[in-house]
Every structure is written in structure tokens, then in C-alpha cells.
Amino acid sequence: MMENTQQQSKPLGRYFTYQEFEDQFLPIVQSLPQDTYTFSYLGSSVQNRSIYGLQIGHGKLKILAWSQMHGNESTSTRALLDLLQSTDLDQIIKGVSLYIIPVLNPDGLEDWTRVNANGVDLNRDALELSQPESLILKDALDFFEPDLALNLHGQRTFYGLNNSVLPAQLSFLTPSGDSNKQVTDSRLQSMSLINAVVEQLSSSMGAGIGRYDDGYNPNCWGDHCQSLGIPTVLFEAGHSGDDYSRDQVKGFYLESLKIVISTAKRNMTWSDDTETKYFNIPEIHKSYCDILIRNLSSSCKSVDLAVMYHEQLIEGQLCFIPMIFAINEPSILYGHRTIDLTSHKTYNDDLVISEDMEVSSDSLKIRSFIK
Ligand SMILES: [Zn+2]
């Protein structure tokens, strides 16, 4: 059954099929020391793809982590696979029972969409439980009764840190558990874990780390867990520069997982300044676009064009297509790449904007690419 697993497969890129995921994940599971893990089939997605649960470690502290409930947020799953292959995995799981559900939305992954195959956003289905994938997560919560929940996501390239030129490479949230956004014990516990990540990661690796909005929505799983008194940390993989494969961010994400697990193991408590420190983490807001083209001359005026890459699966490959997103939009302050046309004389020859707003220019190297 495992005859092909001896050859080293190359790490997953930004897009992969569910089959490619299984081809990586299942051999990783089989390579774990036998007495350290329990592996189970939890059920199937709408389109009948298997969803798995892997529990590693037998420690007291129970941590549940699920990834990619939004199908087009793959950095979370890739970081989990890296965690499972870490050379210090035995140390990481010492004292912990870590229960992982990688790719909760396999159909969304396959089609590179946020929603599942019925068009439902699983992260708005925590109360209704209308989808098979939601029921799998609910069953895991009921069965495992975690002391800590890690809700693993990724976000688009829009986000920068408030009052800063830094893009958000990662953002975190301790979701609210009620509409008054009360700072409960479980929120304080998760705040202290997030503070530990910010302290350790931004100093040692210079990562841009932001805080996600804590508006309450009981249909979201993080908010739901927190309302049950389960400390919950929501992770968002962000973006900077030309890291469209998100390999750099994946490294930060992996380190964050390790910091959260090791801090939670030491203690799940908080101090007097935990809340202040948490709310001092800069909030994220939409201040970025992918390419900011400044000072384009257009009928005697000069305009700024914000270009965003549209992610589209074409013949099984993830294409990033540059599209006009906004013109002279004051809230967009920065580009992951900025081109000021006052210093470019030749662009007019080849800067083309198609009818459906796709942008291309050979001289400015604006073109579609595959990741
Ligand atoms: Zn998400």
C-alpha cells in the first residue's frame, strides 16, 4: 500500500489538490512513532473526500487545531505538515494531546474557493451545522473537549498594520464570546498566548504581526468556542513583498504554532498587563494592494491605480492575474510593489488595460504568474 512513499515528495506549494495533500499527509502520519498517535477517518465532505483527525501525544493539555475550513487558505495546512515533520516534534508534544484536523474543507481546496461544495462558508455555520464538514468539527469538539482551540486561517493581501508601513504577515485574534466583547478568562488566556507570539516572533524574526477585529458573530467557530469557555486563538497567514508562495509567512506561522503550544504548556494564565499588551498590538486594516501604480498620466490628469491579483485555477494551476482594483483610492496607502511612473518614460508603449480590467505591461513586468 505504501510502496511509493520512499521517494521524497516535494513540499506542497500554495495550491495543491486534495490527492496531493493526502500523498504528503498519510506517509507523514505513518512515519510517526506508533505509540504517539491515533489516526482516524472522521467523515466525508459534500463531494465525498475524506476528512481525517490525528491526535499526537498523550499529555494533559488538550489542544484542537483545524486548518483550511476556507479552502483557499492553504498556508495553515502547510504549516501543520511542517510541524508534524519538525525534528523537535517529540519535545513539542510532550505534555500535550494535540488533535489536528487538516483541511476541513477539501472540496474548497480542490476548487480554490473559500466556501464548501454547497457554497456555504463553514465559518458561518457554527450554530446551524447545515454542512457535513461543520458536523465533523462539532463532533471533534464534543469528543475531544479541548482546553485550547486553534482556528487556522489565511487572509488576502489587503492588510497592513494600523499606523505603520508594515504589511500584516500574520494576524491573530482571540474571538469574542458575546456581543459585548467581554474580556473573559478564556479570552485572557488566549490573549496571553498571542502576546507571547508577538513578543518572541516580532523581535527575533521581524515579522509584521497584527490584531484582527473582534466583532462578535456567533456563527463563527472561534466565537462559538469562546462562548463555550474554550480559549481560542485564530491565526491568519498574511503577506508581504513578492512572497506569493507564502513560504516566508509559512515559516512564521510554524514558529507561532510552536510558541503557542509551548507557552500554553507552561501555563494558561494571564497577568495584569495581558489585556493592555494585547490591545496594543496594532489592528490590521485594508491599506495595501498588490501593485500600486502611482502617477499614471490620463487625459492631462495623473491617477494612482491599485492593482490586486485575482487568484484563479486554470487547468489545475493557480494563476495570479493582475486586475485594476481601485483608482485614486485614498485608503490604499501602500503596494507590496510600488511603481512610480514619473520616473518611467516608456511604459505608455505597452501598459494595457483590457475590457475586464486586467493589466499588463512588459516594460513594467506586470503580468500573470503561477504559484
Ligand atoms: Zn479563513
Image: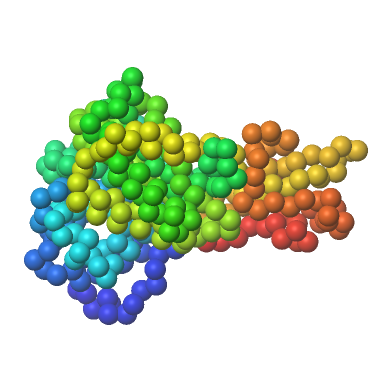
**Where is residue 364, by image quadrant?**
bottom right
> Residue 105's x, y, as percent?
33, 47
Q: Relative to 218, is 307 on the left or the right?
A: right
Residue ID at (27%, 80%): 6
Residue 165 visible somewhere in the drawing: yes
Residue 60 vertical position relative to residue 283 in the rendered view, above or below: below
Residue 105 vertical position relative to residue 204 in the rendered view, above or below: above
> Residue 129's x, y, as percent?
25, 32
In this rendering, the count of numbered labels is 0
Q: Relative to the observer, which residue lies in front, 72 or 250?
A: 250
Q: Relative to the observer, which residue lies in front, 87 or 81?
A: 87
**Where is residue 36, by image quadrant?**
bottom left
Q: Extreme right residue here?
A: 300
User: If the image is split into quadrants, where does the N terminus sit?
Assistant: bottom left
Residue 152 visible somewhere in the drawing: no
The scheme the figure's colours follow is rainbow
Q: Relative to 48, is 98 on the left or the right?
A: left
> Residue 177's x, y, as percent?
28, 27
> Residue 50's x, y, as percent?
25, 53
Residue ID at (72%, 37%): 327
Q: Relative to the observer, which residue lies in front, 151 or 52?
A: 151
Residue ID at (69%, 34%): 329
Q: Relative to 158, is 294 on the left or the right?
A: right
Residue ID at (24%, 54%): 262
Q: Extreme top residue here?
A: 180
Q: Relative to 273, is 146 on the left or the right?
A: left
